[in-house]
Amino acid sequence: MQGFRFDPLRLPPEAAATRQRIRAYLSSEREAGRFAANRSWDSFDPDFSRRLGPAGFIGMTWPKRYGGQERSALERFVVTEELLASGAPCGAHWVADRQSGPQILKHGSERARQEILPRIAAGECYFGIGMSEPDSGSDLAAVRTRAVPADEGWRINGSKIWTSNAHRAHYLIALVRTEPPGEDRHAGLTQFVIDLSAPGLTIRPIRNMAGHHEFNEVFFEDHLVADDMRIGPPGKGWQMVLGELAFERAGPERFMSDYRLLVEAIDRAGPSPDARQAVEIGRLVSHAAGLRRMVTSIAGLIEQGEVPGVEAALMKDVGTTFEREVPEVVRRIAPAEPSLDDPADRYVDALARVTLQAPSYTLRGGTREILRGMIARGLGLR
Amino acid sequence: MQGFRFDPLRLPPEAAATRQRIRAYLSSEREAGRFAANRSWDSFDPDFSRRLGPAGFIGMTWPKRYGGQERSALERFVVTEELLASGAPCGAHWVADRQSGPQILKHGSERARQEILPRIAAGECYFGIGMSEPDSGSDLAAVRTRAVPADEGWRINGSKIWTSNAHRAHYLIALVRTEPPGEDRHAGLTQFVIDLSAPGLTIRPIRNMAGHHEFNEVFFEDHLVADDMRIGPPGKGWQMVLGELAFERAGPERFMSDYRLLVEAIDRAGPSPDARQAVEIGRLVSHAAGLRRMVTSIAGLIEQGEVPGVEAALMKDVGTTFEREVPEVVRRIAPAEPSLDDPADRYVDALARVTLQAPSYTLRGGTREILRGMIARGLGLR
Amino acid sequence: MSHPDDMNDSLSQLLLDQAERLFAEHAPRQVLEAADAGTPPEALWTALEEAGFPLALVPEEQGGAGLEVADGMRLVRLAAYHAAPVPLAETMLAAWLWSRAGGDPPDGEITLAPARPGQRAGIAGGILEGTADGVPWGARARHCLVFAQDASGNPCLALVGAQQRSARPGGRNIAFEPRDRLQFDRVQLAATALRPAPLLDSDGFLPLGAILRSQQMVGAMQRCLDHALGYAGERVQFGRPIAKFQAIQHMLAVAAGHLAAATAVADMAIDAMTAGETANGDLALAAAIAKARTGEAAGEVAAICHQVHGAMGFTQEHPLHYATRRLWSWRDEFGSEPFWQERIGRRVCAAGGEALWPMLAGA
Amino acid sequence: MSHPDDMNDSLSQLLLDQAERLFAEHAPRQVLEAADAGTPPEALWTALEEAGFPLALVPEEQGGAGLEVADGMRLVRLAAYHAAPVPLAETMLAAWLWSRAGGDPPDGEITLAPARPGQRAGIAGGILEGTADGVPWGARARHCLVFAQDASGNPCLALVGAQQRSARPGGRNIAFEPRDRLQFDRVQLAATALRPAPLLDSDGFLPLGAILRSQQMVGAMQRCLDHALGYAGERVQFGRPIAKFQAIQHMLAVAAGHLAAATAVADMAIDAMTAGETANGDLALAAAIAKARTGEAAGEVAAICHQVHGAMGFTQEHPLHYATRRLWSWRDEFGSEPFWQERIGRRVCAAGGEALWPMLAGA
């Protein structure tokens, strides 16, 4: 396909070695009872992240002088997929490691790099995402939060919404308008690193339908941010955000959010499944295998320094469609009444949690409709 | 739902009596070896129709003076669903009975009624549909075939496409432009009954992908049509065509085109199906049951003289989605390599024919996309 | 989308209007929130009892309102439309069955047990023995109507008071409705508390419970679609309401199709229940079809409506989840889709392909 | 959409260009029409033989072109993209296997039998016995490579000439490709015509046949999507190309997703075949995954591309059906999706949930 690059990629030997290292690490964590399996990248556990960082598994690709390991993107990829497969609670550091850190490394000031990256890599510093606003969800270019030049840098007024973990993260990267909207509605936007402990911010919790507090609305009232907390040139925020989104959409978490439910369903079916169970599980596995290969190819593009925007959109659309199917399929082959009140039954518990989480899979990080529009553009239809 | 009327309907006693009559008739036909089962309303068999008419099952609702039986729309409905369930080859008279005859009865001239309706009811006179043109398929209002007043009535130039059976039918009802396109693109269209044996017509066959000749392109070159072969007032063709389409979309053939494949698959699975087969067949049956009730409700609306445009669109969308699923589901529970060369294996034969026909289900009579647009309008979204 | 009461029906508009006002007054947002947090909506239940709704299906001579089954099911849909967090449907059904068995239904909530496939209770010498999981409001209901078979396999109904059974409370479905484990540990029944079960076969409450949940899912789907249509008309992105995007329009058209099909089979089940009062209607098949098709529609409609709502519908603030969490719970209760699909499929296959049509259209 | 040869690959551009020209010249529309009507495309086959494609995978020292497996599969996709109505894929695979078994592959078309699950042939004392249905070009191929097991269950290959087997010709799949019944009636094999089978286990040709069909489906899906993208850009309705409608865009985006996923698993199967040359690669699992996922994608892509084409794509005139009829045929050959899905599922379940990840990502 024109512009769709899913070239076969064989992982290099060092990636295999890294895989063994992270597997050994996770095994020891599990054996020590340090994490409940069946969590995922939306489970916030700072203790887990504070151990994972010093073990060398956060910020792996960054220069050593910023706390990184100077590993390849493929080694980082292997670590992320192993974390997901094990059901480790990665939510605390996930955004910082995946997209905020890389944005700062690539487009941030030297001060931002020195102050922030080593703390991320240590598993101590967490980020939220500051893109959406109440009136601009899918239509990101419609953001109305404004930054105007001030003595110390910029003064920001407005609000951001759906910022995961803003109440327990340290920073977010906010996309704000720095010039009035003109002919080109993508122009005049700028990204800034926002210190969530600084004055001029109010955080309002937004509980999700399962009753959990993950989302927030963040209000900016004359919030001051230094110019060296700017990401990329003023007015070029749209280009910045596209790059950030490609990273946000490109990883294995876009088909593995409920991987642990699949694992539990397999065990529920048992070693001698009936034909229905075998067929449906086999079908899901055939999908997972294809997706894993696609996401591996994308990791290869990232390793080559590419920004795989359309490929990431396509993989995320196919991957999240799969994620949405997993609970719907397994509930049919291993019937259960889902409940959050019986954690001892790991299958029922996973089914309940995933059922309540699944609607977000095709929304967060770009809705299905936005992604399909991007794919259609990649196909030359728009 | 606003405007969606699927009220429960209990069929009246006379419908039950009619059902027994048509069942007895079809049984005797089958026993006499007069039709191969597993055909449907797209199988053209004039012999079958010429027996069915005199038996009183065509044009049933029409006045006796035009060859009808003055039966209710619900009795006609029962006959159509029994024909479909039995796999009778109804293609010859189907369009004439369903939509062309009713259009002529309601909006045609007395001459047209007297000349044509009794022959339809006798099972001797067949119609094609003259709506689509090469450049106006879904966008019907874009028709370019033109009729201009002439001494004897109207002179028509242009062409119609996808006219099923034009090469073996007697008439078609054509939608043509009688006034230049203006502000209101739906204005200035008129419907005419076209005698396919008259001069000024050329019929070009269009074979379908299975190699069958059902479709045609009909070219009009100074074709003359008398004014009393006009349907409805000049310029009001759009209103005429909407009414015709509601009838075209409202019947049980919109979920029963491949009903016989389901029957064969049930027999293929046998009396002791495995769990996969039982579950999937049970699922399809649950869909069929709901659709049958919906289409029965629509028949009730028609009996009350309503034009159930939106309900028909909704039923057709749900019904054809079901029809598209049938071959995809049964091939998974009763695997076979489909072939047209083994008619003795009725399941394999039905599977092959349906597989090749299925793409048309969600196209003919209004594409899925057009229907969903109509439903959305019914929901108040447009 | 409209309210369930837009339908033509025989229930007086008066009664449905009354119910509508009752739910508006006694099941507002705060009551749903409180119920989710564990506080039962006592005022709501009291109001329902005062209106006579729990015993609506019971004949007047037995202390009820003598409502027709179809009208009662309309009320069940309306309660579900409002996500009323009370066992109204269960109580209506239990009271109806008990009255048909010749008993006078008691006041207060009545639940039904067993409620899951594969669970059974037994009766011998007037003594009830058994365990039932996932019983709706099992710990809170004042009475539990238990389906049990005696040694000869005869279906019986036992009316068991709260003090007679032990309950392990604390379980909830994902709509946070109580679903408790009840144990009947050699419960000695009074003579008037044990009766031959009308209408039921060895499946116990499963078919009628499935019909209840089907009606409720219809009501909750209507609510989802109402929410989504409203939201799509208001939410502006890229300079226009999202209702104007073809993708949104087509998704909602599909959802409307599922709702229409689900309503059709739920209506069909009502007919079968009604016929069952006087003739031997094919209740089991109608229940199976209703639950299978409605449950499938529930998943699709919930998914579509969440997609239309975007992140907003995923929040506790937005009321969408009161409907969708119920859909995701109810579709698995009293037998999930595959349970009933398999039933249908086995019956259809055993009869053979040509027998399907008479099964659908009547002999 | 692009041609299969846009990929980076090791096959020289020269060779693929040559193949492209060859198909353009020898497999134009008229040749496809004639083949559908029963006239074999002899000039096409002759041209393919002259180019050395049928024996492309055979080592040079055994008279072949010594092409790598991956490049050979690229050629298979290209032939399928052009709907070339010849058993090129089957011949390439048969010749490759026979050469790996130590034999020198003959000229002419070679087919594979048995080709369906559950069918078997046996060898005893150099005598072959068995029946195989649905054999691709079974009546026309000059040779048939037969998989058979001897009395001890050892997998063998037998090369059988046309005069040695009886054929019931006339069967075709719905792409009108010949699928004949072959009978091996006490066929006495020459010593050089019977060899121990490399790579194969008791499944015989099923896994490798499944991989062939997977590659072919990738090629045919690429063609479908190319057709649909072209048509959507040209066809004007309501005053604009239908490509501008969101419904069309989203459908085609979904199709592109299926194609990408199918390509990924088809590539994976090529890796497994390649690995199998030197190590004990997990061919069976890779084949199962490839056929299951590709077959599922084939149905979806064909459906979407027909929907985009409207009535036009339903005609014999429009070339779309040369691709879609092949997809509908190939997905059921060498085991349909559920056949392979069940294999995968049984293996995964037997190993347990935690073993799935190492199975996907490597131990």
Image: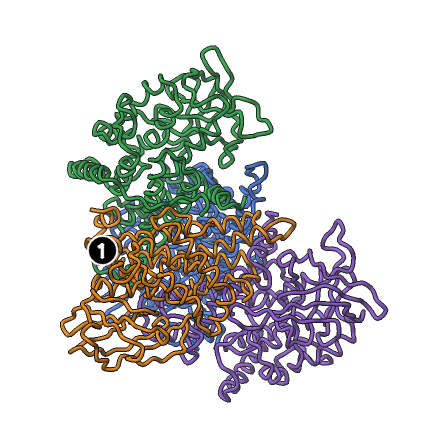
Chain colours: A purple, B green, C orange, D blue
The answer to whether residue D299 of the structure is visible from this angle is no
* Occupied quadrant, residue A55: bottom right
Q: Is residue B23 above or below residue A50?
A: above
Estimate how packed mark 1 is, as few (under 14), some (14 to 19) or many (20 or more) residues with alpha carbons within 10 Å: few
Farthest residue toward the left?
C152
Q: In this view, does B163 lie above or below D22?
A: above
Q: In this view, does C49 lie above or below D50?
A: below
Of A194 and A237, nearer the camera is A194
Which residue position is annotated with label 1? C277
Farthest residue toward the bottom?
A32
Farthest residue toward the right?
A151
Residue C232 percent location from the top left of the image:
56, 52
Q: Is residue C224 above or below residue C94?
A: above
Residue B298 percent location from the top left of the image:
36, 41
* Occupied quadrant, residue B192: top left
The answer to whether residue D355 of the structure is visible from this angle is yes
Residue C187 left/right relative to B141: left
Residue C148 left/right relative to A25: left
Residue C11 percent location from the top left of the image:
35, 51
Of C87 and B197, nearer the camera is C87
Tally the marks.
1
Of D133 and B48, nearer the camera is B48
Of B249 and A53, nearer the camera is B249
Judging from the image, mark 1 belongs to the subunit labelled C
Farthest residue toward the top?
B151
Amino acid residing under circle 1: Glu
Q: Look at 34% across and 75% down and name the residue there.
A: A271
Residue C74 percent location from the top left of the image:
36, 54
Helix, strand or loop status at disc 1: helix
